[in-house]
Image (spheres, rainbow, N blue to C red):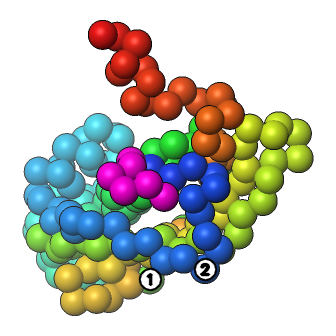
């Protein structure tokens, strides 16, 4: 991968490579409240402190869909910035809860890659992403397949070429 390049072309992925996504992201109360309202998830465990205090967790849980969105977003610049699309999510595991104030760190392991069988300008990359809190406790793990463009083959425009066209 070229220095200072955003994202990876299909050719830039190496099976077995672990990519650390930095910086981390602290989940704020406002993040959890807005996301919960935006998605119409009205379970009180996400925003009713009194209710949540009576659960096994003793305090509100961060909406797990928010955690998924944040962790996926953290991986974009390193993993899918130059992808055409996500093709498949095979599992999402949530082994430990995320709470307001937790800082999430993520990493992705490239576990498989193959050329597309139908189009020569792309390939499929299988990625295992893990997220940890500030105590290095695993809070999320998911696997997905991304349709990655090949460099210079035209599957997607190179962002830098679009910027040059506008001038």
**Residue found farthest to the right:** 117
Please give left or right for residue 46 compared with residue 118 in the image.
left
Q: How crowded is mark 2: few (under 14 residues within 10 Å), some or many (20 or more)?
A: few
Q: Position of residue 70 (x, y in %)?
A: 32, 56
Q: Distance between the residues labelled 1 and 2?
A: 23 Å
- Give the prevailing secondary structure in the magenta stretch: loop
| Residue 75 percent coordinates (x, y) | 40, 58
In this picture, residue 69 sits left or right of residue 87: left
Residue at label 2? 16
Residue bounds of the magenta highlight:
1-6
- Dot 1: element: loop
Task: Identify which residue is drawn at 37% across, 56% down.
Answer: 3
Q: Which of 47 and 138 is in front in this view?
A: 138
Residue 159: image quadrant is: top left
Above or below, 134 against 15 in this view is below
Snapshot quadrant of residue 52: bottom left
Q: In this view, does 24 lie to the left or right of 29?
A: right
Where residue 33 sits: x, y (%)? 18, 50
**Which of pointers 1 and 2 lies earlier in the amino acid sequence?**
2
Q: Residue at 21% across / 65% down in the picture?
A: 23
Residue position marked by numbered label 1 in the rendering: 95
> Does residue 90 appear in the picture of this structure?
no
- Depth-wise, is mark 1 or mark 2 nearer the camera? 2
Residue 106 appearing in the image: yes
Relative depth, front residue between 47 and 158: 158
């Amino acid at each position: 991968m070229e220095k200072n390049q955003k994202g990876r072309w299909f050719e830039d992925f190496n099976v077995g490579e672990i990519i650390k996504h930095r910086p981390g992201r602290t989940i704020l109360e406002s993040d959890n409240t807005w996301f919960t309202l935006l998605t119409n998830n009205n379970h009180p465990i996400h925003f009713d402190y009194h209710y949540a205090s009576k659960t096994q967790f003793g305090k509100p849980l961060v909406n797990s869909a928010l955690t998924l969105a944040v962790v996926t977003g953290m991986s974009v610049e390193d993993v899918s910035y130059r992808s055409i699309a996500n093709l498949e999510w095979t599992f999402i595991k949530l082994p430990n809860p995320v709470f307001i104030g937790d800082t999430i760190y993520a990493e992705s392991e490239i576990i498989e890659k193959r050329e597309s069988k139908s189009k020569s300008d792309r390939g499929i990359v299988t990625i295992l992403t893990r997220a940890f809190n500030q105590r290095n406790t695993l809070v999320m793990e998911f696997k997905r397949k991304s349709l990655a463009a090949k460099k210079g083959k035209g599957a997607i425009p190179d962002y830098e070429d679009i910027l040059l066209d506008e001038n």
